[in-house]
Amino acid sequence: MIACAAAAQKTVSFPTEDGGVVFADIYGAGERGVVLAHGGRFNKESWEKQARVLTSAGYRVLAPRLPRLR
């Protein structure tokens, strides 16, 4: 049960230098961090399973929503 509480996900946002906003899911509360960047047809939610495994190992995980390149 403790691992589930540590793996609780919340959505955060922060501004970019060019006036945009980045939205991301953040998991865990560890002092060490991992950023999971998606590509192709995936999105930030695609990392949920991996993020929960990493938080149970003591990491804080950030999974941002990246813009599609055109």
Image (cartoon, helix red, strand yellow):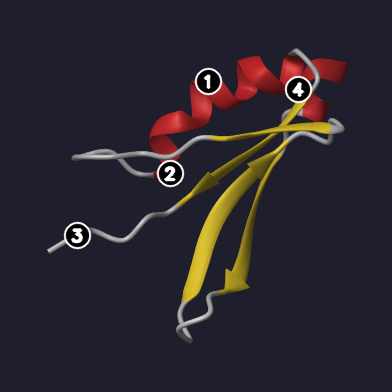
Contact (Cβ within 8 Å) of mark 2 with mark 3: no
Nearest to N terminus: mark 2 or mark 3: 2
Nearest to N terminus: mark 1 or mark 2: 2
Question: Of the numbered discs in the image, which one, if any, rests on residue 4?
Answer: 4
Question: Of the numbered discs in the image, which one, if any, rests on residue 50?
Answer: 1
Question: Residue 3's spot in the image, x, y percent?
Answer: 80, 17
Q: Secondary structure at mark 2?
A: helix
Rendered view: 23 above or below 50:
below
| Residue at left offset 42%, top offset 54% | 65
Q: Secondary structure at mark 1?
A: helix
Q: Residue furthest front?
A: 17
| Residue at left offset 23%, top offset 58% | 68
Nearest to N terminus: mark 3 or mark 4: 4
| Residue at left offset 50%, top offset 75% | 21
Contact (Cβ within 8 Å) of mark 2 with mark 4: no
Q: Residue furthest left?
A: 70
